[in-house]
Amino acid sequence: MASFRFGDFELSEEGRQLRHRGAEIALQPRVFDLLAYLLRHHGRVVTKDELMSALWPDVLVTEASLQRLVSLARNALRRGGMDNAVRSFPRIGYRFAAAVETGAGNGPGDDRPAPAGCAGTVERARVLFGQRNWRAAAEAFERADLAGGSSADDLELWARALECSGFPNKALEILRRAAIAHGAAGRDRAAAAVAITISRIHLERNEAAAAKGWHARAARLLGDVTDSREYGLLCWMGARIAAADCEPERALALSGQACETGRSIGDTEVEALGLMYRGFYKLCLGSTEDGQDDQDHAAALALSSGVDPMTGSTLYCNILWACRNFGDWERANQWTLGYQKWCRECGILNFTGSCRLHRAELLSVQGTLDQAEHLVTEALEGLSTDAPWAIGDAYRVLGDIYRVRGEFDKAEQAYENACAAGWDPQPGLALLQQEKGDGAAALSGLERAMVGRTWPTLQRQGILLAYQALIAARNGLRERALQVIGSLEDVPGRWSTPSIRAVVAEAKAELCARAGEPAGAIEQLEIARRLWSSVGAAFNTAELRLAIAELLILQGTPAGAETEIRAARFLAERLGAAKLIGRCDELEGALRAG
């Protein structure tokens, strides 16, 4: 049994493993056998008949089966830029065309001897990395580095282990060293890939100038190369920078280019990233159904192909942000459960601040308020280092939790903190202002929240408009409420999420009630209640049950009202929402007074 080194790869026949820079690549058994056979015979062209006989002994297969294995093998090698290593000879067969070293070495991708006393530690770090024991791997790489320095490839692995451990800020200096080392060795594509990673981390830290600088550096290193993984990643990162610069159309075009590049070269990760962000910017620009389809396709593509942990985290983070901005809680719940399972499988146990924030808001909507508050507090600690731009959003979520509990002073303080951090805490702030009797301020705040072309503003338009309609209706502004409802319903399918439809139904119910049409109001409230219930929104469901109970009491239907109050009390007590519990008491008193 031999081992083979080529480029940044190492294939071990004994261990039946293919590794790229120390990380194992999952292969189907026959794909591994194909690569191993071609490597053993890398000095010649291996005929198709010979390969089929070796791979499928005593089984009759067509050339299509062999072509499929070759395609899968090239896809596995593409992450190291070696997809062209398996060269086709039409009507004859295939040859492994890259330089191959037979036997053991210091490790894949390391083109110099390991420093004395360091080899064992480096090898241990690589093994831990391959096992996805991220924190232990990072510590081992650090010890190896202190013992005598690290290769560029090992620096990359060290940085990735830190990111997967939840410390992207600690990875930056290590990545800078890797970029310099790759550049000094003339490995421009490798240096460009590292520069793109540095750009991403800086952008997520709200350091736009540094992000743009490293992105430009990557572009210069790649030059005119457009048929590579690195070019696809360059387009994807360019899309994120364009979105941050309030250029959603350009962001859409660049993410589409990333998707097409990934698809054309057979790189699943690049295709999934481009597809996910293309969907994200479609949502910004109003193509709701197409955007959601792109994002769901990207997530499914990632799940079915075993993407890199950081790529998977980026994909899930993106889809959950989009769900949150659209109030698409049912979809958010489905993908959150999938994300948590995926993280456990990848060994990612230390969730980033933004991941905790996603989970916290979903829990707050579902009514698990204490746990949600704890997660937001944890998130705020992590966001200060890995995503400081989202600190204001965390305070917004915290304000929503306090508002639901009826702790209005604490909610107001949290919303003020969100504003101070540069984040608009709508629509929660408007609902608090309405609750305190200041409808004019509530409407004015919602209108201001829709000014601009940042991606959060564009994606939140539907939910903000829906609450404009509701608050206008509650303040007796019938024509204004109808106008906003019309703008939401004029484009079928654009604002189709249950939460937006539920708030619109609440606005219609308010208009019916004010027009002296209690039956119509109850009908719309029932629609809203079912929609909120379908996404597990406990507080909203309880509120609507109490509103229905009040109308049933006025109609002289005490039995129905009693049922609604009992159901609402169950939810209110689970939430710990004192205001809702007090409202249950009031309505039960009205029933007894009868």
Image (cartoon, grey):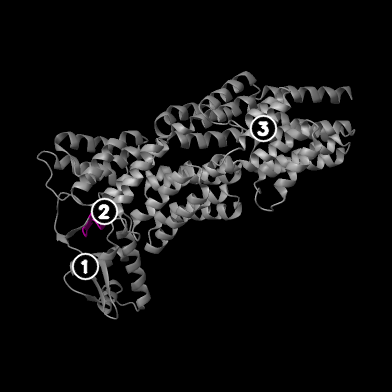
Decide which of 151, 71 is in the foreground and name it: 151
Q: Position of residue 441 (x, y in %)?
A: 69, 26
Residue at screen point 55% across, 51% down: 282
Q: In the rendered structure, which segment of residues is drawn in magenta?
A: 8-19
Hey, which quadrant is residue 498 in on the image? Answer: top right
Q: Can you identify the residue that label 3 sits on?
A: 539
Q: Position of residue 578 (x, y in %)?
A: 68, 22
* Chain-order first, disc 3 or disc 2: 2
How many numbered discs, if any? 3
Decide which of 529, 60 is in the foreground and name it: 529
Residue at screen point 74% across, 43% down: 485
* Chain-order first, disc 1 or disc 3: 1
> Where 191 sits versus 205, above or below?
below
Reply yes or no: does residue 10 show up in magenta. yes
Reply yes or no: does residue 376 show up in magenta. no
Q: How far is disc 2 from disc 1 in space, using C-alphas?
A: 19 Å
